[in-house]
Image (cartoon, grey):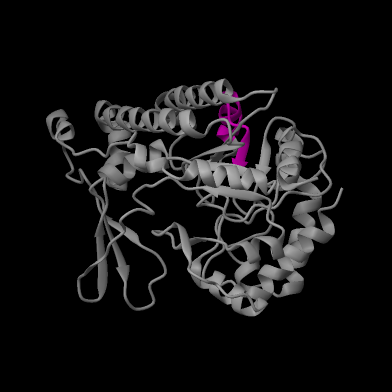
């Protein structure tokens, strides 16, 4: 099988020749630039000019030699957005400062800085009015330049036999609400000022739909997986109750996902299918059935070290309904601080659980961070290719 056949087979919950491997198909399944440089040096590969999938997170697009050496199956398309477009820092002494197209302020420490952190919000006052909201200078979501050149990239990926994954405009409804209002304010809005929360959520939904109409009209026939992202889980529980999720977020996500999948289906020919990838960290088990109900085909990052996210029970209870994309190795402790032997053991255990009957794409639990040693990355990849054969 080539990479695209391999991925589409497992997404159809059939068994390919081996478990597909994603590295940097999305901005939440990639590798930090520091770890990437160390890996290239370790393998004797020149980095060349480094391209970033996400400048804010410092996540890179691996070069062709790394892709071939690690047998990566995915190819990510990254439209222009506030995380990879005109990220220009202003010197502020000990830090660099960047204000993005949403009006969010980000800082990057000059000493020991690993990524940009948002420190300022567009509407961070405790109380705001609808008039304040209306005055916000929202970005133009359907700007044609956002997808310029991506069709040529997708055609090249198809020629190489790789699976094409398309990233969206911005983070999810919940996360963007926090970025617009600040986390504390937005969480209070959900309960104390629900009309304001709905204004924010509906505006983000509107912009997302505008973007996806543009992007899928241009690229839908070449895209295998469409990626949307949000974060509803914590290490132990959820950031909002399941009732709040179902009241405020689920109907809007259902509208978004229906639009994406309808548009994607209209662009497909010869019986091909596109799939919806949805990222949410942490313990999302109580709302995973809701995700599936509203059209999620793929769950990422499969945070198996969070409460309620044991891979055995996840595969048993949901493995026929959703593909698990991630969960291949524990990235909080094992991958950065374990030995190569411990990494191999963790990969073996997780792969053998999640690969049964297809429906599994290997990736770490979120991005490979800066401190991960190259020896552990290679132990992970080698274990995948040893134990991930059907």
Residue 148 in the figure: left or right of residue 10: left
Residues rendered magenta in the picture: 286-299
Examine the rendered structure and indicate whether residue 245 appears above or below residue 356.
above
User: Whole-percent x and y of residue 157?
Assistant: 62, 47
Give the image quarter of residue 207.
top left
Residue at horizontal 24 percent and vertical 64 percent from the top: 97
User: Whole-percent x and y of residue 107?
Assistant: 29, 64
Residue extending farthest to the right is: 390
User: Whole-percent x and y of residue 284?
Assistant: 56, 40
Give the image quarter of residue 164.
top right
Residue at horizontal 48 percent and vertical 67 percent from the top: 50
The answer to whether residue 155 of the structure is visible from this angle is yes
User: Whole-percent x and y of residue 268?
Assistant: 61, 25
Q: Quadrant for the N terminus, please.
A: top right
Give the image quarter of residue 286.
top right
- Depth check: 364 or 38 in front? 38
Residue 293 in the magenta stretch? The answer is yes
Examine the rendered structure and indicate whether residue 207 appears above or below residue 281.
above
Residue 62 in the magenta stretch? The answer is no
- Depth check: 307 or 292 in front? 292
């Amino acid at each position: 099988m080539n990479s695209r056949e391999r991925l589409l087979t497992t997404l159809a919950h059939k068994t390919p020749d081996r478990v597909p491997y994603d590295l940097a198909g999305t901005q939440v399944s990639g590798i930090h630039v520091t770890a990437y440089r160390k890996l290239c040096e370790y393998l004797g590969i020149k980095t060349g000019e480094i391209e970033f999938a996400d400048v804010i997170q410092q996540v890179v697009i691996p070069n062709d030699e790394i892709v071939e050496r690690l047998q990566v199956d995915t190819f990510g398309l990254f439209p222009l957005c506030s995380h990879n477009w005109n990220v220009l820092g202003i010197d502020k002494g000990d830090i660099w400062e960047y204000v993005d197209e949403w009006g969010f302020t980000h800082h990057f420490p000059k000493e020991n800085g690993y990524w940009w952190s948002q420190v300022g919000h567009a509407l961070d006052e405790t109380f705001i009015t609808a008039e304040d909201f209306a005055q916000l200078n929202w970005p133009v979501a359907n700007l044609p330049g956002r997808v310029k050149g991506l069709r040529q990239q997708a055609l090249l990926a198809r020629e190489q036999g790789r699976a094409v994954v398309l990233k969206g405009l911005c983070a999810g409804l919940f996360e963007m609400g926090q970025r617009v209002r600040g986390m504390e304010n937005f969480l209070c809005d959900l309960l104390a000022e629900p009309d304001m929360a709905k204004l924010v959520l509906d505006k983000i939904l509107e912009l997302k739909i505008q973007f996806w109409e543009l992007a899928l009209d241009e690229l839908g026939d070449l895209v295998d997986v469409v990626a949307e992202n949000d974060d509803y889980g914590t290490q132990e529980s959820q950031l909002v109750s399941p009732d709040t999720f179902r009241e405020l977020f689920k109907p809007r996500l259902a509208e978004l996902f229906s639009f994406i999948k309808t548009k994607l289906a209209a662009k497909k020919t010869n019986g091909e299918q596109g799939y919806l990838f949805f990222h949410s960290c942490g313990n999302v088990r109580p709302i995973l059935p809701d995700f599936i109900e509203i059209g999620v085909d793929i769950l990422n990052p499969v945070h198996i070290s969070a409460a309620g996210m044991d891979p055995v029970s996840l595969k048993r209870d949901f493995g026929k309904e959703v593909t698990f994309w991630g969960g291949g190795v524990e990235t909080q402790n094992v991958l950065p601080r374990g030995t190569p032997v411990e990494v191999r053991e963790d990969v073996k255990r997780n792969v053998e659980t999640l690969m049964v009957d297809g429906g599994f794409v290997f990736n770490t639990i979120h991005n490979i961070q800066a401190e991960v040693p190259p020896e552990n990355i290679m132990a992970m990849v080698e274990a995948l290719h040893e134990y991930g054969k059907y």
